[in-house]
Amino acid sequence: MTWTVTPERFDSPDAALLRRDYYDEVASRYWERPATAREIDEGLTDDGAELLVPPTGEFVVGRFEGAAAACAGLIVTEPGTAELTRVYVRPQARGTGGGGLLLAAVERLARAAGVRRIRLDTRNDLVEARGLYAKHGYREVPAFHRRQYAEHWFTKEL
């Protein structure tokens, strides 16, 4: 079982499908019902993905056994600080180490861009994500913003 994780444009065909799957899952879990295609389209409209390109950010796609299976994004929010976002591993590839490889790839790109601290927020129901972040050195901190859907905040010094 092999993974590769490489930078890719957020709007490439594979990246666009991964972002769509990510939004479908987080919306469906939040609403406790399947998200509709219209809701997914609305959620992806003006979602800030255009910031996921240098110099404002990065986007990576993970491929498991050659197939696009995961993604993660990074947005520089201020000098030396970036936000981790859109971390997603397709269900069939979970438990194979892809999440940790995504984080490592994003952290390497962040360091290369001069980022010294990565922050993120997540929700109560995204238990697996919170576990992944804690396992890889992100520590839970007090809220650093008040956005809708944010219930836990994490940071990692690079």
Image: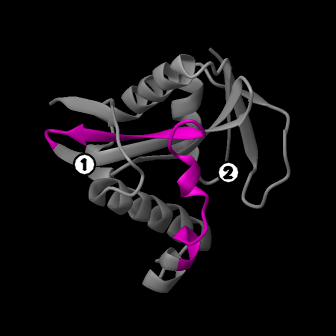
Horizontal and vertical percent position of residue 149: 72, 59
Name the secondary structure under disc 1.
strand
Q: Quadrant of the C terminus?
A: top right
The amino acid at mark 2 is: Asn
Q: Tell me how many marks there are.
A: 2
Label 2 to label 1: alpha-carbon separation: 27 Å
The quadrant where residue 111 appears:
top right
Horizontal and vertical percent position of residue 138: 63, 24
Q: Quadrant of the N terminus?
A: top left
Looking at the picture, the colour scheme in use is one colour
Of the residues tagged 2 and 1, which is closer to the observer?
1
**Residue 124, disc:** 2
Label 2: how many Cα within 10 Å (few below 14, some 14–19, many 20+): few
Horizontal and vertical percent position of residue 34: 46, 77
In the picture as drawn, the residue positioned furthest to the top comes out as 158
108 over 42 or under it: above or below: above
Residue 111 highlighted magenta (yes or no):
no
Label 1: how many Cα within 10 Å (few below 14, some 14–19, many 20+): many
Pick the residue in front: 7 or 68: 7
Horizontal and vertical percent position of residue 105: 42, 26
**Residue 68, disc:** 1
Name the secondary structure under disc 2.
loop
121 over 155 or under it: above or below: below
The amino acid at mark 1 is: Ala
Residue at position x 60%, y 73% in the image:
31
Magenta region: which residues? 42-66
Nearer the N terminus, badge 2 or badge 1?
A: 1
Pick the residue in front: 94 or 146: 146
Residue at position x 32%, y 33% in the image:
6
61 over 148 or under it: above or below: above
Residue at position x 32%, y 52% in the image:
91
